[in-house]
Image: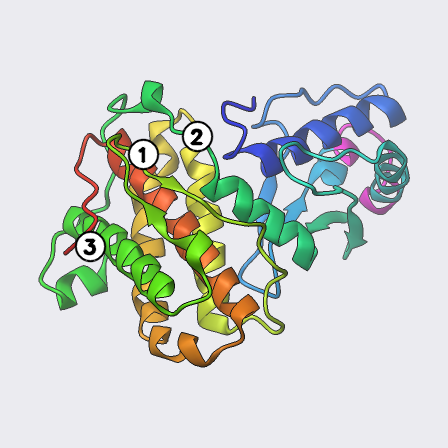
Amino acid sequence: MLQNALHQALPAAILRLDSAAVALISQADIGTHSGSIPLHLDVPGPGLTYTSAVAHAVAALGPWPPMAVAQALQTTLASMSLVAPPLQVALVPQVKGEGWLQYCLTAAELASWLEAVYKAPPEPALQHQWPLPLPCDSSPLAKKLHLSELALLQHSHASCWRLLRQGHQMGGLDDLAPMETSGRWPAIALPPLPSPPQPLPPVAQGVLHRLSRLVDTLATADPNRHRGRHGLYLAEQLYDWEATAWQWPQAPSAQRHYYLGMVAASQRSLQRLLDQAGLPAPRSL
């Protein structure tokens, strides 16, 4: 299930935990593959929150109400104390509503997730395996900039490199500078990220949410998971967020550090997307 140490580490670990907990509390067999338990990434909020419908799936197979199943699952999962490598993320859910299990990343766990994204090794074996599914005429920003959807993805990738270069020029962020190498995958030396600024501005939160959707989608081998669509969503959010970059030099160093970590993670994910489609990933416009 974990095709890559980065990409599906969080949702796959949640699904694996849910399946293991079901096996412990009941004899119900709902399967262990990723499609057997509905898992939803919530709309942008203060962090990344995944909502699992595992209690409802189990309740549908027997005489148990979803809330009772959810509470039993929560108790069982809390005792398992599983952390998903390479993430320093303790996956302990909270019961919400009528039996939903929510996995909410803390600020420190969110920083760990970002580090895993931008430090992940390349995946040359995945390149050019599938056509890039792109919706037609679905990006208002592409029309505004008179670009095709593919060109918008390349434009956004180059913009990430520009922001990283600017971050280096701000001073005090030498470790964040992209290091040129002869290979296709440049090394980006990044120290551990600090916790995200509180509160995270809505436009930055939007980038984080769209980035996580693209990261999750890139982990699957299913061409119908709309990798291109999520890439375009991220590109549009990055364009809006980029308009605030002139304010970053006035921000505290830790805040700039975290923002540039988000940019580096976005650059790496967009490069993965473009590589899978066999397209150039330009570093400059």
Q: Can the viewer see residue 33? A: yes
Magenta-tinted stretch:
58-68
Residue at numbered disc 1:
185
The quarter of the displayed image where residue 48 is located: bottom right
Mark 2 touches mark 1? (CB < 8 Å): yes
Above-or-below relation of 80 to 171:
above
Instruction: Classify 10 Å Cα crowding around label 1: few (below 14), some (14-19), many (20 and above).
Output: some
The local secondary structure at tag 1 comes to loop
State the residue in front, 170 or 237: 170
Residue at numbered disc 3:
155
Q: Position of residue 265 (x, y in %)?
A: 43, 48
Nearer to us of marks 3 and 1 is 1
Q: Quadrant of the N terminus?
A: top right
Q: Amino acid at mark 1?
A: Trp
Q: Position of residue 173 (x, y in %)?
A: 45, 61
Which residue shows up at 85% across the image and 32% down it? Answer: 80
Q: Earlier in the sequence, mark 2 or mark 1?
A: 2
- Separation of marks 3 and 1 at Cα, in angstroms: 18 Å
Q: How many marks?
A: 3
Residue at numbered disc 2:
121
- Separation of marks 2 and 3 at Cα, in angstroms: 23 Å
The local secondary structure at tag 2 comes to loop
Nearer to us of marks 2 and 3 is 2
Instruction: Classify 10 Å Cα crowding around label 2: few (below 14), some (14-19), many (20 and above).
Output: some
Residue at the left extreme of this rendering? 146
